[in-house]
Amino acid sequence: MSTTIHKLIIPTPFPVGDLNAYLIEGEKLTLIDAGPKTEEAWKALNEQLMKLGFQAGDIEQIAVTHHHPDHVGLLDYFPDSVPVIGHRYNDVWLQQDSVFFQQYNEFFFRWFERFGIPYPPQLLVKKLKSPMDYSCHRSLTKTIAEGEQVDGLEGWRVLETPGHAQGHICLYHEGEELLVGGDLLLAHVSSNPLLEPPQENQTERPKSLLQYNQSLKKISELCISCVYAGHGEDVTDVRGLVEHRLKRQEERAYTVLEMIKEKPMTVFEVCQRLFPSVYEKQLGLTISETVGQFDYLEAIGEIRLDETNPYWLYYAQ
C-alpha cells in the first residue's frame, strides 16, 4: 500500500519563502516540520488541514528535519502531549538553552575576529540570532539517528545529512523511492551550509560545506524518484541536480582561489568581493558561504593559513 503524503504550504517571513510541511498518513498521523511562529502560519496550517479533513488536534506526532525557525516555530502551538521527534543536536536550539547560547556568543565572537570582520561582534551576533524570535521553546520528546525508523511511519528510516544544519535529517522510504528532504536539496536554490558552534563530542568548528557535499553525495547514491523538499518544488532528477550543485560549488571555490592568488586575504575580504551588494545585510549567510569555500580549498590543499595575526590570512599554495 502506497504512502499518503500531503504537502502543506506555510508562509514564512524569510527570504527563502514558503515552507513545505508534510502530513503523512501512517499508523500515526505525522507532521514533518511545522512552520514559523506566526499567526499567519498557524492559520495557513489549520486551513489546509481542514481541507484534508483533519484538524491540528488530530496530529499524533511531529518530526523535525532540523532546528531552523521556519521549520519549528509552530511547535509552540501544539500541546506538550504531542511528541516531537528529531536529531539530538536540535534540542538546544528548540529549547533556546541559555548555556548553549552563551557558548554560541563566544563561538562567534572568537571566529568573527579570526575572519577579519571589522564590526562590533555583539551587534553581529544579535542580528544572527534575530530569526530565533520565530522559533519555539520546546524540547524533543524522542531523538532519532541514522538508520532508525520513526514509530508509526512504517518503511521510513532516518538519514543523517548534516551541512545546512548540524542536526539535519531526511526520511527515506526505500520501497517507494521517496525522500522527505528538509532543506538538503532544493530545486530553485542551493541550500546554505551554515556556521554553527560545536556540540557534545565535537571539539572543532564543524566544516559545514564539506559535510553538506557528503550529504548530497549520500542521497545521490540512493534510489530516489522524488524528494519532497522543504521549500519550492519537488525534486525528481536527484543525481542530476546534485551533480550540478557540486559543480557550481567547485567553480565558486576556484573563483575564491583566484582572488587569493592575487594577494593573501581574510575570509571577510573575500566575502565582500563575492557578495558586494548583500554581504552587510546578510552577513551570516554570506560569511557561512565564504568560509565553506575556504574549508574546501584547504581540504584539497590549494591554500594555507597564517594564524599569527588575530585575523587569519590565507595564502595560495
Image (tube, rainbow, N blue to C red):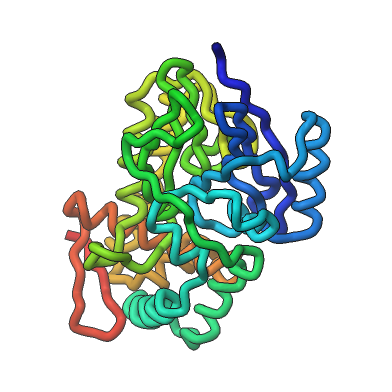
Question: Exactly how many numbered labels are in the figure?
Answer: 0
Asked whether 279 or 150 is in front, the reply is 150
194 left or right of 13 in image: left
Quarter of the rendering occupied by the N terminus? top right
Residue 307 location (% of width, % of height) = 20, 78
Q: Is residue 181 above or below residue 16?
A: above
Quarter location, residue 165: bottom left
Residue 167 located left or right of residue 95: left
232 to 280, vertically: above or below = above
Say if residue 33 shows up in the picture: yes
Q: Quadrant of residue 147?
A: top left
* The C terminus, quarter of image: bottom left
Residue 244: x and y in percent read: 44, 32
The residue drawn where x is 59% and y is 37% is 30
311 with respect to 271 (left or right): left
Would residue 112 be visible to someone looking at this image? no
Q: Residue furthest front?
A: 81
Residue 217 in the image: state x and y as whole percent: 33, 34
**x and y, in percent, of residue 305 in the image:** 20, 69
Q: Residue at x 44, y 66 (%)?
A: 92
From what the image shows, is residue 238 above or below residue 278? above
Residue drawn 46% across the image and 19% down it: 177
**Relative depth, front residue between 33 and 273:** 33
State the residue at coordinates (49%, 23%). 178
